[in-house]
Image (cartoon, helix red, strand yellow):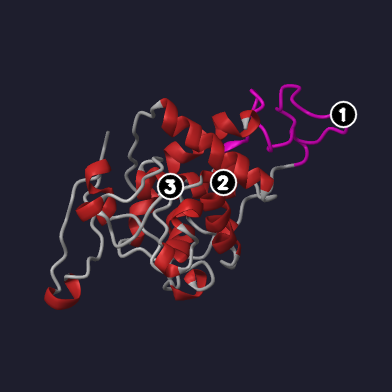
Amino acid sequence: MNTMLFSRWLPAIEKTSIVRKGALGVAGLAFVGGAVAGPAVAAQAAPEHVGSPVSQSVMADKDHKNDKGKKGDKGEKKSDKKDRKGKPSRDRLVPRGVQGEQSRIDLSAEQAGNVRAIVKATKKAGLDERAAVIAVGTSLQESKLENLGHLGDRNDHDSQGLFQQRPSSGWGSVEQITDPEYATTAFLKGLKQVDGWRDLPLTVAAQKVQVSAFPQAYAQWEDQAADLVAEAWNNS
């Protein structure tokens, strides 16, 4: 697994301006995870993205003379909503492609179950595969897809659950934010407040909801999140 070093703002930083760093892992998750702002203000509190404009996709030639018979009855290009195995297409999962070096972890049965729970909650909320990729990628960064309770001295304030949401910031009670369906739904409510979230890189969209001290940390999980959602989408 390729990991990144990252850290979370701790109360002591306000006094010393020193950032403590910890390695990616369950032991260091509490220093990283945690949605600082509540769901009602997170989308407005995050900094604006100043990257390059979203590139427009090039329209395919309608003629398709060399399509080798992969056309519909009307001679149009086969739908890109699903790939040949019936999974969501890569274009729908990662419309901008991944950004930067990617990380990947092996999942336990519990973690895989949490992926399915996130996908199920996303579908229940009426959102698409892209929303699920953003949610799964965010949870990979915040908790490694583990539904964490309070970690004592290692905890980042009162952050808990798959998305390290904080009761004190208005995300819900401890019981609520440690329920995967509730936590995912709360995250998605924040995501829907972000203008153009479908066209943003995962790390930008996630940051506008989570308001992390290290906004680029989410980018490393986009490839694995897309693969996980592709596998779980039709089985959740």
Graded by Cα atoms within 10 Å as few (under 14), some (14 to 19) or many (20 or more), the crowding at tag 1 reads few
Task: Write the start and end of the magenta stretch as one range.
Answer: 62-90
The x and y percentages for residue 85 are 64, 23
Task: Decide if residue 98 is in sight here.
Answer: no
Question: Which amino acid type is marked by label 2?
Answer: Glu
**Residue visible at 58% across and 50% down in the picture:** 131
Q: Nearer the viewer, residue 48 or 167?
A: 167
The mark found on residue 13 in the picture is none
Q: Nearer the viewer, residue 193 or 156?
A: 156
**Residue visible at 58% across and 53% down in the picture:** 185
Question: Which amino acid type is marked by label 1?
Answer: Asp
User: Between tags 2 and 1, which lies in front?
Assistant: 2
Quarter of the image where one finds residue 233: top right
* Residue 103 falls left or right of residue 128: left
Query: How far apart in space, not on screen, are marks 1 and 3 (Cα)?
Result: 45 Å
Q: Return the residue at label 2.
A: 181
Marks 3 and 1: in contact by CB < 8 Å?
no
Query: How far apart in space, not on screen, are marks 2 and 3 (Cα)?
Result: 10 Å
Quadrant position of the C terminus in the picture: top right
The answer to whether residue 82 is above or below residue 195 is above
Q: Nearer the viewer, residue 68 or 111?
A: 111
**Residue visible at 65% across and 47% down in the picture:** 128
**Residue visible at 51% across and 53% down in the picture:** 176
Marks 3 and 2: in contact by CB < 8 Å?
no
Q: Which residue is farthest right?
A: 74
Q: Earlier in the sequence, mark 2 or mark 1?
A: 1
Secondary element type, mark 1: loop
The answer to whether residue 234 is above or below residue 20 is above
Q: Return the residue at label 3.
A: 162
Q: Return the residue at label 1.
A: 73
Task: Decide if residue 9 is in sight here.
Answer: yes
Graded by Cα atoms within 10 Å as few (under 14), some (14 to 19) or many (20 or more), the crowding at tag 2 reads many
